[in-house]
Image: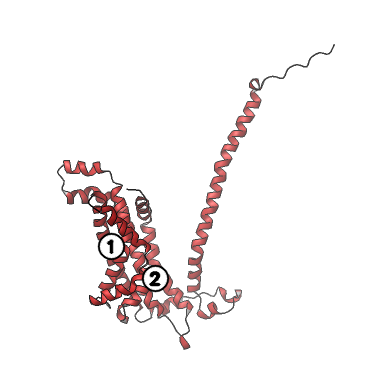
Amino acid sequence: MATAAPARPAAADDPSGSTRRTTTASAAGHAEPRTKLVLYALAAVLAVLVFAAPLLWSLLRAFQTNAVITEAPSWSTFFDLTAANFAAVGGTAGLGRATLNSLLVSVSTAVLTAVVATMAGYGFGRFRFRFSGAAFGAIVLTLMIPFQAIITPLFMQLNAMRLTDSLLGLVLFYTTVNLPFGVFVMRNAFAAVPSELEDAAFVDGAGTGRTFFSVLRPLVTPGIATTALYAFLASWTEFLGALTFLTQQRLYTLPVALLNLQQGAYGAVDYGLLAAGAIIAMVPCVVLYVALQRYYVAGLASGSLKG
């Protein structure tokens, strides 16, 4: 009579099998975060390449002569670099004055936009009055209208106010264009601050001004920095408005002055000189953005909150 085969031990009685399954699950669990980390790193490197490649290409072209830029690509001359373009830009008449004009206009625009947007954002974010939602909606709606579509009536209005051919008029124009974004960011920044902080300050005897400057202002500093930085960058790089409202060469801003960096016969453009001028114009933007990056990101995050 055949003897029955001994029964295999249950899975629960097999400690070695349980250990193997636990080890496999643990290894899979560690492999998944590592895979995500590698994918995130690759995506970050790709994003850096996409955004940095044009900047590096412009920087390389700025150190090449116009002959090297316009000729057929050749490895024998491609890396013949020189600083002659930057020396020529530094010696160009009127470019230094245009840089000072751009700096004056951009800084004034940033300060004025930040002040007005902060005051408007405080009113919209901390008070409720009749038609406040409709007024704020109208301001946000203007974000969808490019200023190029209304540049003709803006020119006629500034001309009637005798503010054309004036840096003050250009500052007011840039401030008007950048205010909707600034009001949007500052309104949401103030709305994100708990009202209990303001109530506690009033209980302690602080007035509206003291509460604003001592309690609310430190909390909305990222929004203020975002508004000022956005206005500065927009006015520093803006070309069409400056070209439209300014006709005197002594008032030209840097983008308009760079248009005049043309040398040679029959209006031939010196691309190396233009690339060097563009790199010089790029430096303040990069420095400011790197210096205020943490405020800029925090301000945009506060502006995305629903209030």
- What residue sits right under mark 2 in the picture? 281
Q: Is residue 77 above or below residue 18?
A: below
Q: Nearer the viewer, mark 1 or mark 2?
A: 1
Viewer-closest of 173 and 73: 173
Label 1 environment density (alpha carbons within 10 Å; few <14, some 14–19, many ≥20)? many
Lateral position of residue 49 relative to residue 172, left or right: right
- What residue sits right under mark 1 in the picture? 113
Which label's residue is closer to the chain start, 1 or 2? 1
Q: Give x and y (percent) for residue 62.
A: 47, 73
Query: Which residue is outermost to the left?
Result: 205
Residue 41: numbered disc: none
Lateral position of residue 252 relative to residue 161, left or right: right
Mark 2 is on which residue type?
Ala
Q: Is residue 255 above or below residue 205?
A: below
Q: Give x and y (percent) for residue 230.
A: 35, 61
Mark 1 is on which residue type?
Thr
- Which quadrant of the structure image shows residue 87? bottom left
User: Which residue is located at x 57 percent, y 37 percent?
Assistant: 29
Q: Give x and y (percent) for residue 131.
A: 25, 54
- Which quadrant of the structure image shows residue 114? bottom left
Mark yes or no: residue 264 visible.
no
User: Which residue is located at x 51 percent, y 69 percent?
Assistant: 57
Q: Is residue 302 above or below residue 95?
A: above
Label 1: which secondary element: helix
User: Which residue is located at x 25 percent, y 72 percent?
Assistant: 168
